[in-house]
Image: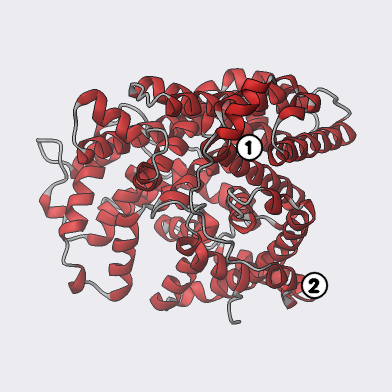
């Protein structure tokens, strides 16, 4: 770097996003300890699982009862304990379509559960509930429970399923118009909950406590045993997550990075919550710890590009990541050097671990390329900002899907969860699933923009999708937001189709795509539903307290 470049960098006005200090204190996080973490409760849990299997998965001609049981098990976060029984029950249901009673609730529940579990079921089952104009018949509006189930089912639509599009629009209007105060309290809560965000767009584990309280209020005799198991399971999972969080907190503190990067977000707990949202199962400790590190680094690097670095500095930093060469950073400010060194060490350490576990030594090129592509996309946004340029929506999203960081997450999660025999398929996976990666990236980018656009405009950041569309089309903010929400809906339809096709085309990848990759998109809804989930800690603190700190009374 010549003296002129040095002068420009020193003269660069460092900005601030005015992020508040971290509200989660190290001592508190590292003191978390639960009595449910030992072996004392394992036997009790196993006995309850056996009791549920013996008492509830019995042969019955009432297929709706079976479907409701599967629905409750899913809502309580217990599906992994009953996979065999659920598969057998659904095989029976699939072959007994004629036994499903012709009412809206039954048909919608039947459709939702089968499609959720990858069974082929046609949207035509709802044809009889629609009027000649393609809307839901008004005679169905009195059936709030059925209309609510229809709304949930409609969020599993594929591209081109017009009946489900109309069902979603009609059921939303009907539920918004329903006199919620005339419903029983529990049904009213469910209506409000679904209109805020349907369960198909929620992270399942984050919603378990809500469902436990709802089923308790229902007071059905057939849920007592399941609720007992769900509460114990929740507390045991929470104990495992507390152990993981302690380790993440110690890693973060030992790094000393937050002292060097005062301008960046200090959000280790929120990063850990993102990892929990991708997989909460106790056996995935190393996955969550790795992902927490990766997400922390994504936030910090994002803030380096958005807030701290001059354009010349960012070009050097991008070049260092692209060449994967620590030496390139010599002329950068100390904090940017430290940032790259941590990225380099963390990534190499993970690549070495992959090599030890699978005997495959080509992980690092895939990991470093994902980071380089991410940084290049951030640099493009920094260049737009430096010359006050507003791209078209298409140009913005072409770059923004990469700067969303989904590709970075996908590569790391793929290596973390895929069986060693399939790990060499990463290049093939990325090639065959370009559309999936794109649609998940689109959802993350657009939900982020919906949640953070106002705050970012106030501090003069690069334009969001909303601003790009408003300027390109001379549209109002409301029109732009409606456009963005429509694009999110379309991306979900494409993802729904991919999730149904994957088991047939790439069976070994089905668990990864259905249980981890799609959760990245769900986490975006969770994070940005009410603003900036990483920047504003207050909005997510209640959920964190509930999931990671407060056990359920047994």
Give the residue displayed 42% in from the left and 71% down from the top: 214
Give the residue displayed 50% in from the left and 56% down from the top: 70
Report x, y in % for residue 410. 62, 33
The local secondary structure at tag 2 comes to: loop
Determine whether, in the image, residue 232 is placed left or right of residue 165.
right
- Residue 434 image-quadrant placement: top right
Q: Which mark is residue 443?
A: none
Give the residue displayed 69% in from the left and 68% down from the top: 29
**2 and 1 marks in contact (CB < 8 Å):** no
Find the distance from the CA under tag 2 to the CA under tag 1: 29 Å
Of residue 124 and residue 554, the one placed in the foreground of this image is: 554
Q: Quadrant of the N terminus?
A: top right
Q: Which mark is residue 512?
A: 1
Report x, y in % for residue 116. 47, 44
Of residue 376 and residue 177, the one placed in the foreground of this image is: 376
Label 1, residues with CA under 10 Å away: few <14, some 14-19, many ≥20: some
The local secondary structure at tag 1 comes to: helix
Report x, y in % for residue 554. 61, 82
How did the renderer colour the structure? secondary structure
Up-down relation of residue 358 to residue 79 (above or below): above
Label 2, residues with CA under 10 Å away: few <14, some 14-19, many ≥20: few
Up-down relation of residue 496 to residue 191 (above or below): above
Up-down relation of residue 154 to residue 432 (above or below): below
| Residue at which label 2 appears | 38
Determine whether, in the image, residue 360 is placed left or right of residue 141.
right
Determine whether, in the image, residue 528 is placed left or right of residue 328.
left
Determine whether, in the image, residue 223 is placed left or right of residue 374.
left
Can residue 429 be seen in this snapshot? no
- Residue 78 image-quadrant placement: bottom right
Report x, y in % for residue 477. 23, 39
Mark earlier in primary sequence (2, 1): 2
């Amino acid at each position: 770097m010549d003296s002129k470049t040095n002068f420009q960098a020193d003269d660069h006005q460092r900005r601030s996003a005015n992020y508040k200090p971290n509200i989660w204190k190290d001592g508190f996080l590292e003191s978390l300890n639960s009595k449910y973490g030992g072996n004392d409760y394992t036997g009790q849990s196993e006995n309850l699982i056996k009791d549920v299997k013996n008492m509830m998965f019995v042969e019955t001609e009432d297929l709706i009862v079976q479907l409701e049981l599967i629905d409750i098990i899913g809502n309580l976060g217990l599906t992994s304990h009953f996979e065999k029984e659920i598969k057998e029950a659904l095989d029976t249901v699939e072959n007994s379509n004629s036994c499903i009673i012709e009412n809206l609730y039954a048909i919608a529940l039947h459709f939702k559960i089968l499609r959720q579990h990858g069974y082929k079921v046609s949207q035509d089952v709802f044809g009889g509930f629609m009027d000649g104009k393609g809307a839901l018949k008004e005679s169905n509006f009195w059936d709030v429970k059925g209309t609510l189930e229809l709304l949930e089912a409609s969020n599993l639509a594929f591209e081109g399923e017009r009946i489900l599009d109309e069902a979603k629009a009609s059921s939303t209007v009907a539920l918004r118009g329903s006199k919620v105060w005339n419903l029983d309290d529990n049904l009213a809560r469910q209506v409000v909950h679904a209109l805020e965000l349907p369960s198909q767009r929620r992270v399942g584990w984050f919603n378990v406590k809500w469902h436990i309280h709802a089923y308790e209020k229902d007071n059905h005799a057939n849920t007592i045993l399941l609720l007992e198991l769900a509460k114990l399971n929740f507390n045991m999972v929470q104990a495992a997550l507390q152990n993981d969080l302690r380790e993440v907190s110690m890693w973060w503190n030992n790094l000393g990075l937050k002292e060097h990067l005062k301008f960046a977000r200090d959000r280790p707990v929120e990063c850990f919550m993102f990892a929990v949202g991708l997989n909460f199962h106790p056996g995935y400790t190393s996955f969550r710890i790795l992902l927490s590190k990766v997400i922390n680094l994504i936030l910090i690097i994002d803030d380096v590009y958005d807030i701290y670095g001059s354009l010349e500095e960012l070009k050097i930093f991008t070049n260092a990541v692209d060449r994967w060469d620590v030496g390139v950073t010599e002329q950068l400010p100390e904090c940017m050097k430290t940032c790259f060194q941590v990225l380099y060490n963390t990534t190499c350490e993970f690549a070495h671990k992959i090599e030890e576990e699978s005997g495959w030594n080509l992980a690092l090129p895939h990991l470093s390329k994902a980071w380089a592509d991410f940084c290049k996309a951030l640099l493009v946004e920094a260049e737009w900002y430096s010359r006050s340029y507003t791209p078209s929506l298409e140009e913005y999203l072409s770059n923004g899907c990469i700067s969303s960081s989904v590709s970075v997450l996908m590569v790391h999660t793929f290596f973390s969860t895929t069986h060693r025999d399939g790990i060499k398929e990463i290049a093939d996976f990325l090639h065959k699933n370009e559309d999936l990666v794109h649609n998940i990236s689109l959802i993350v980018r657009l939900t982020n923009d919906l949640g953070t656009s106002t705050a970012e405009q106030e501090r003069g950041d690069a334009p969001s999708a909303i601003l790009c569309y408003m300027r390109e089309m001379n549209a109002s903010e409301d029109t732009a937001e409606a456009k963005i929400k429509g694009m999110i809906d379309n991306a979900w339809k494409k993802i729904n189709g991919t999730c149904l096709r994957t088991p047939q085309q790439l069976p070994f990848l089905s668990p990864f795509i259905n249980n981890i990759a799609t959760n990245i998109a769900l986490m975006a809804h969770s994070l940005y539903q009410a603003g900036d989930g990483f920047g504003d800690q207050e909005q997510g603190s209640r959920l964190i307290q509930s999931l990671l700190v407060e056990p359920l009374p047994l």
